[in-house]
Image (cartoon, helix red, strand yellow):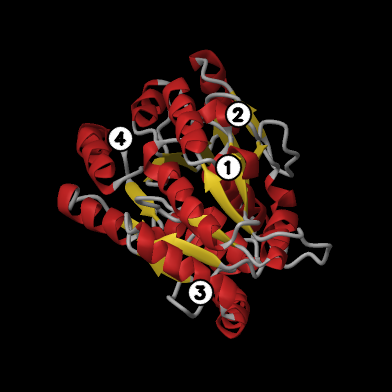
Amino acid sequence: MKVLFTFYVPSGGVETLNKLRCESLQRSGIECHVLYLMPGSASQNITNFPVFITSRDEEIKELLDTQHYDAIIVTSDYLLMERLRCLGYEGILIYEAQGLGKRADAESLIIEAVPYLRAHCNAVLIPPTDHLLELFISVCPWLHRYVIPNIVDVQSFRMIPGEPPCHPVIAWVGRLENNKNWSEYLKIAHQIRLHKPALHLWMFHDPDLASEEQKQLFHEELHALGLNDRLNVFTNMPNHIMPVYYSSIAGSGGFLLSTSITEGFGYAVAEAICCTCPVLSTDSDGVRSFIVHNHSGKFYPLGNVEQAVSEGLELMDNPALRSHIREQGRLHMISRFGSESYAHSFREMLNSFSIF
């Protein structure tokens, strides 16, 4: 049994997902390869499975002709399905909905994809995210749906002992784009700093994925709010060293702030929780899988800066609640997101197409 996973670029949550699931599936006897159409920040990561980076038709065709994949999982890029068929692939094509952005954007994309899904796709694979499931039911009722929770590496992502920062840190992980809602992060941090003058800000992002317009807007708002002297920016950090940073944030007395409008899953939030780093997040759908308010994390209403500040200060100033959230958050992740369950569900999906 041999499968190929495809995506635009090796970066962000999808690159993390591909690494984790390929490792898990290969342990269960499924040979995995990954194809990215463009190089990205994680292009140099060492893997124990083949990773190809090319957008050239002749190279993709050679890959298809020599590897004879039983199934190809095409993540997000619905146009690639037609391309693969035109290049001669006749096997099972499964469209995977990850990282489609805001609900309205996801709906528009799925509607645009309908002709390609009808002509070339055997099924859709989605995480347990309400808005994605609802959209595929309403827009593509004929298309078979498989819902499999993403893997989280609960073993590698754990508290790493070390000397914490002297001052509290509010961290943010994402891309400088509208859906990740970086502006709200700055506004909330500005207000919390009025209560915590020693506050520091850490931002983890990939500048190559940001437009020049977004970079300029970010620079302007950062200086307008007077936060430029408190900001540390970490770019293109390898995923495997993030536990050190999440542990430092937790030890500082701060937290991870997720301001996304919509998340299909939310790897940064999940991985921070595994490291016992408290998380305050918008209710961006995908994160409901692992945030239970005041139990494994905290929610605040999107756009409500005042409420976010209140919840954030409680995370910092209420030691009993903070300790409870840190402990229960990790236990929650361990109980729900293991690699073995993903491999079992994935194999069942392939078996349903008579791939054994």
Q: Badge 2 local density, few (<14 within 10 Å), some, or many (20+)? A: some
Side of 321 where 139 appears, left or right: left
Determine which of the numbered discs, if any, sits on residue 15 in the image. 1
> Residue type at mark 4?
His
Residue holding disc 2: 40
Q: Give SS at disc 2.
A: loop
- The earlier-in-sequence mark between 2 and 4 is 2
Q: Nearer the viewer, mark 3 or mark 4?
A: 3
Taking depth in this image into account, of 334 and 200 the one nearest to the observer is 200
Residue ID at (16%, 53%): 138
> Residue type at mark 2?
Gly
Residue holding disc 4: 120
Taking depth in this image into account, of 85 and 255 the one nearest to the observer is 255
> Residue type at mark 3?
Glu
Where 204 sits versus 251, above or below? above
Residue ID at (67%, 60%): 249
Residue 118, how many percent across, how many down?
Answer: 22, 38
> Residue type at mark 1?
Glu
